[in-house]
């Protein structure tokens, strides 16, 4: 954090000090003119006075410029301090340095209570006071050697159970140029939206994440540069980040992508499990993002636009394509941050496929695949406040937030999905803790109550509450307390 000295004179650059000394010297020189000056040559005396006046005027201009520089420097320091105060939270650094390589990681666990009915052979999240369960273990390496940079992160979920799976989250090498532009090659974050996690500060993210448009990792190359007040990202991605180790065919991955699965659907929407492989894989995706930073405004603002286009390689389905466009804005005032985003996305596919429609496309992550609405609008907004707690030795800061997002689908027979999240994040040393209360009518990570005491069993493509048809449109809640230790 930038510290400001209460004595403004300490901010004066050396030029201001020289100007002040010059004024004192000139004043002394004027007062020290000898009394016999009246008897000297008048023209010489007038010339001397004129020269002193010229020097005095020059010194006054130099002093004024120095004071102006001081004010500007103080203003820049205040703006920097404000941006630091409202920046996205990062856990305290507890990593290990091995030369140019930094080793770190995290261990996280959840307490969950919500609208969960009849979970057989699974944690009882809906009763008996909720459930405590392992969330994830992750190991990460970062490289910073001369101008060469890199990052690697691998995650395990939830280790030691029959439902365990693991995958690569990040894996790239890059180069930092003299102007701080960066080139990254490998599995890296796709530049789309206002920041790495979209508008969200919460554990649950917003709905952009669940349609593959926030915190999305793919395999490709990305170039980032700053031009005046602009930040420009250009990316080409040959494929998604890929599938790793789990029970699903193609969904043991971190971020949501169109995937292959083994399910098919009959004319009534009933799902048959364990058939022939079918679905899609991402290919040849192009991304462009431009963000303009209004740093001199009364409320510092980032205005941006994101564009994405790519191809889909089909299995037992014709090839297709997809595109997305988004406008987004982040406003910061003191410790407040307001983030807004509006996105249009379309997955253009043919209806001649094993699930029998072009209005749904199978997408997967976290070892599970299910159809998502192929065309929709996604509005999202979040408001957060970062409150530092220097008087509390056990807490660095708390970040309360409220978020809303929705998937507004083109298909009139589908119900929209809404997600409302209220909570706070707590930072203390290496600990970073989320406390989220999420309320949703179609996010399958939030409850499984299908109404009338029944549960979603994913036996019908139109009967479950999800990102696709959302047939039952039931509202569910989930309270999550995520305790994470970062090192």
Image (cartoon, grey):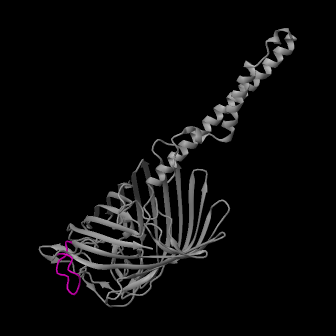
**14, above or below 157, in the image:** above
Q: Which of the two residues, 455 or 308, is positioned nearer the viewer here?
A: 455
Q: Position of residue 26 (x, y in %)?
A: 73, 25
Q: Position of residue 445 (x, y in %)?
A: 29, 73
Residue placed furthest toward the top: 39
Side (left or right) of 85 relative to 10: left
Side (left or right) of 463 relative to 370: left
Asked if the stretch drawn in magenta spans residue 301, the answer is: no
**325, above or below 369, in the image:** above
In this view of the protein, can residue 129 be seen by the observer?
yes
**477, above or below 303, in the image:** below
Residue placed furthest toward the right: 41
Residue placed furthest toward the left: 452
Q: Which of the two residues, 320 or 187, is positioned nearer the viewer here?
A: 187
Q: Position of residue 197 (x, y in %)?
A: 42, 64
Could you tell me which residue is drawn at 68 percent across and 28 percent down? 60
Asked if the stretch drawn in magenta spans residue 118, the answer is: yes
Side (left or right) of 89 relative to 274: right
Q: Which quarter of the figure has residue 395?
A: bottom left
Q: What stretch is highlighted in magenta?
A: 114-126
Quadrant containing the C terminus is: bottom left
In this view of the protein, can residue 359 be seen by the observer?
no
Q: Main secondary structure of the magenta part?
A: loop
**20, above or below 410, in the image:** above
Q: Where is residue 363 in the image (x, y as percent from the top left)?
A: 38, 76
Q: Which of the two residues, 171 or 108, is positioned nearer the viewer here?
A: 108
Q: Which of the two residues, 359 or 287, is positioned nearer the viewer here?
A: 287
Q: How many marks?
A: 0
């Amino acid at each position: 954090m930038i510290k400001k000295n209460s004595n403004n004179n300490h901010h004066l650059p050396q030029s201001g000090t020289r100007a002040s000394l010059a004024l004192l010297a000139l004043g002394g020189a004027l007062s020290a003119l000898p009394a016999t000056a009246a008897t000297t040559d008048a023209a010489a005396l007038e010339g001397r006075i004129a020269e002193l006046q010229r020097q005095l005027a020059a010194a006054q201009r130099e002093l004024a410029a120095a004071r102006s520089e001081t004010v500007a420097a103080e203003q820049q320091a205040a703006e920097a301090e404000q941006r630091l105060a409202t920046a996205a939270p990062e856990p305290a650094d507890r990593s290990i340095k091995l030369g140019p390589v930094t080793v770190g990681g995290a261990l996280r666990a959840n307490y969950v209570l919500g609208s969960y009915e009849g979970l057989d052979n699974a944690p009882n999240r809906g009763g008996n006071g909720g459930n405590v369960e392992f969330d994830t273990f992750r190991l990460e390496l970062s490289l910073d050697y001369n101008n060469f940079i890199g990052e690697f992160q691998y995650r395990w979920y939830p280790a030691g159970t029959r439902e365990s799976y693991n995958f690569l989250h990040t894996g790239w090498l890059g180069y930092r140029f003299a102007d701080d532009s960066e080139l990254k090659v490998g599995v890296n974050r796709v530049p789309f939206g206002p920041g790495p996690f979209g508008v969200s500060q919460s554990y649950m993210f917003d709905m952009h994440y669940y349609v593959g448009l926030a915190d999305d990792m793919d395999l490709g190359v990305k170039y980032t540069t700053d031009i005046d007040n602009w930040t420009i990202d250009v990316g080409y991605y040959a494929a998604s980040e890929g599938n790793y180790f789990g029970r699903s065919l193609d969904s043991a991955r971190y971020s949501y992508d169109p995937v292959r699965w083994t399910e098919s659907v009959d004319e009534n929407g009933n799902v048959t499990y364990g058939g022939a492989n079918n679905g899609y894989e991402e290919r040849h995706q192009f991304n462009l993002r431009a963000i303009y930073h209004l740093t001199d405004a009364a409320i510092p603002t980032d205005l941006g636009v994101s564009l994405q286009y790519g191809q889909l390689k089909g299995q037992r389905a014709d090839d297709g394509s997809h595109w997305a466009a988004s406008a987004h804005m982040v406003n910061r005032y003191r410790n407040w941050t307001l983030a807004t985003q509006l996105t249009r996305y379309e997955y253009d596919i043919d209806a001649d496929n094993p699930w029998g429609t072009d209005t749904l496309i199978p997408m997967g992550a976290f070892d599970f695949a299910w159809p998502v609405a192929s065309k929709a609008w996604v509005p999202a907004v979040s408001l957060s406040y970062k409150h530092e707690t220097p008087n509390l030795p056990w807490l660095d800061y708390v970040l309360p937030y409220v978020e809303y997002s929705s998937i507004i689908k083109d298909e009139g027979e589908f119900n929209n999905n809404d997600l409302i999240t209220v909570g706070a994040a707590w930072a203390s040393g290496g600990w970073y803790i989320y406390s989220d209360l999420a309320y949703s009518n179609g996010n399958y990570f939030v409850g499984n109550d299908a109404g009338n005491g029944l549960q979603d069993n994913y036996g019908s493509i139109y009967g479950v509450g999800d990102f696709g048809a959302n047939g039952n449109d039931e509202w569910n809640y989930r309270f999550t307390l995520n305790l994470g230790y970062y090192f």
